[in-house]
Image (cartoon, helix red, strand yellow):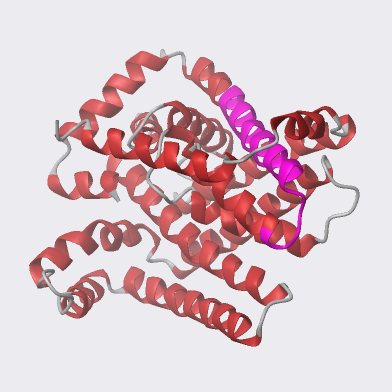
């Protein structure tokens, strides 16, 4: 029951998000919007999604300081995305760490630590993106001030990550003491919560690796903004870049919500909510959200299947191995997997 409860909760959240996104929908208008897409822009959008994926593969290789070749990092990253697309518990992250650990000079622990760093960098980037999206929109001054605060907070978080990478034990002690003041938390529980993240940062103690990794994170998100803008041009004749930033920031927050695999539901609900809030046509926005999410799923899954063939392993074999590792990992590594 304990194992299936998170899956059940995710399915419920997905169902609620889909109801929220598509209640009172004019499905005839949505289908009409899908039929009116511009094929040229659609092909460009698929290519942009693939390019965005390649930047994330390059970042992973950089975070591992070249111990994983660029081409291997790309295909293993897409393979991991394939698993995340269809399996719960983010097993794709474990699967690619398992396969990366088989490479000469690599280990499962080092690969998994780099995945933790990826997530931390992406969290900071999403907060930055949300701040930029808010500031760039015609919103009340209080909202823009809140966006500016988020941007400054993200920079502060980046500095904190850099300090933690250089002095992990000190950061762990300080962080657990601060969070320990939260009611019902306590310093020991806070330490257990923070330990996987701080241990993961130990892999980027070198400032050049840290700076390069976050620099590639920014490149990856710029590529994602470009892909989002191109996908929006599939449906609309003119799209301000700031609207693509807003849509991507909403999607970035949406996929952090526990849900069914591939973040079905929260992705669509978040994108539809923000674009209709700035007066985009609801039916066209619903069509866009479905098609854009499907494009990401199709491209990353197709690339992941190629990566799977390249590795010469079966999907079921790696899924079982990843699940076994997740279930029986030592305490430190189990925390990284759950984080």
Q: Which residue is drawn at 54% across and 19% down?
A: 305
**Quadrant the N terminus occupies:** top left
Q: Nearer the viewer, residue 94 or 253?
A: 253
Residue 274, x across and y down, in percent? 63, 58
Left or right of 63, for residue 330: left
Q: Which of 103 and 300 is in front in this view?
A: 300
Q: Is residue 293 visible?
A: yes
Residue 272, x across and y down, in percent? 63, 49
As for residue 266 lying within the magenta part, the answer is: no
* Vertical order, 105 against 221 (above or below): above
Q: Which residue is drawn at 89% across and 53% down?
A: 238
Q: Nearer the viewer, residue 209 or 31?
A: 31
Quarter of the rendering containing residue 40: top right
Query: How would you classify the magenta stretch by its main secondary structure?
Result: helix
* Vertical order, 93 against 32 (above or below): below
Q: Residue at x 38, y 76 (%)?
A: 160
Left or right of 286, for residue 317: left
Residue 256, x across and y down, in percent? 44, 51
Residue 190, x across and y down, in percent? 16, 67
Left or right of 3, for residue 36: right
Q: Can residue 222 be seen in this view?
A: no
Provide the residue span drawn in magenta: 277-303
């Amino acid at each position: 029951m304990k194992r299936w409860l998170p899956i059940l909760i995710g399915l419920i959240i997905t169902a609620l998000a889909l109801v929220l996104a598509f209640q009172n929908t004019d499905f005839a208008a949505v289908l009409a919007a899908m039929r009116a897409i511009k094929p040229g822009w659609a092909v460009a959008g698929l290519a942009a999604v693939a390019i965005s994926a390649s930047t994330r593969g390059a970042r992973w290789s950089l975070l591992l300081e070249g111990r994983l070749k660029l081409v291997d990092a790309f295909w293993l990253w897409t393979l991991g995305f394939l698993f995340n697309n269809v399996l719960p518990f983010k097993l794709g992250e474990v699967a690619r760490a398992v396969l990366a650990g088989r490479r000469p000079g690599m280990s499962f622990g080092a690969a998994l630590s780099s995945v933790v760093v990826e997530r931390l960098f992406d969290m900071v980037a999403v907060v930055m993106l949300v701040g930029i999206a808010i500031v760039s929109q015609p919103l009340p001054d209080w909202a823009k001030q809140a966006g500016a605060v988020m941007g400054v907070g993200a920079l502060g978080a980046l500095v904190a990550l850099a300090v933690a990478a250089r002095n992990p034990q000190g950061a762990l002690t300080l962080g657990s003491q601060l969070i320990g003041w939260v009611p019902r938390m306590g310093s020991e529980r806070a330490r257990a919560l923070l330990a996987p993240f701080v241990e993961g940062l130990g892999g980027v103690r070198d400032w050049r690796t840290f700076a390069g990794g976050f620099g590639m994170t920014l490149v990856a998100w710029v590529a994602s903004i470009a892909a989002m803008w191109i996908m929006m041009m599939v449906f609309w004749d003119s799209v301000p870049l700031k609207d693509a930033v807003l849509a991507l920031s909403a999607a970035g927050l949406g996929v952090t919500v526990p849900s069914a695999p591939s973040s079905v539901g929260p992705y669509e609900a978040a994108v539809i909510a923000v674009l209709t809030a700035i007066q985009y046509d609801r039916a066209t926005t619903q069509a866009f959200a479905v098609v854009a999410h499907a494009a990401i799923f199709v491209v990353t899954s197709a690339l992941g299947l190629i990566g799977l063939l390249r590795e010469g392993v079966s999907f079921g074999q790696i899924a079982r191995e990843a699940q076994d590792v997740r279930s029986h990992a030592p305490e430190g590594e189990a925390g990284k997997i759950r984080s």
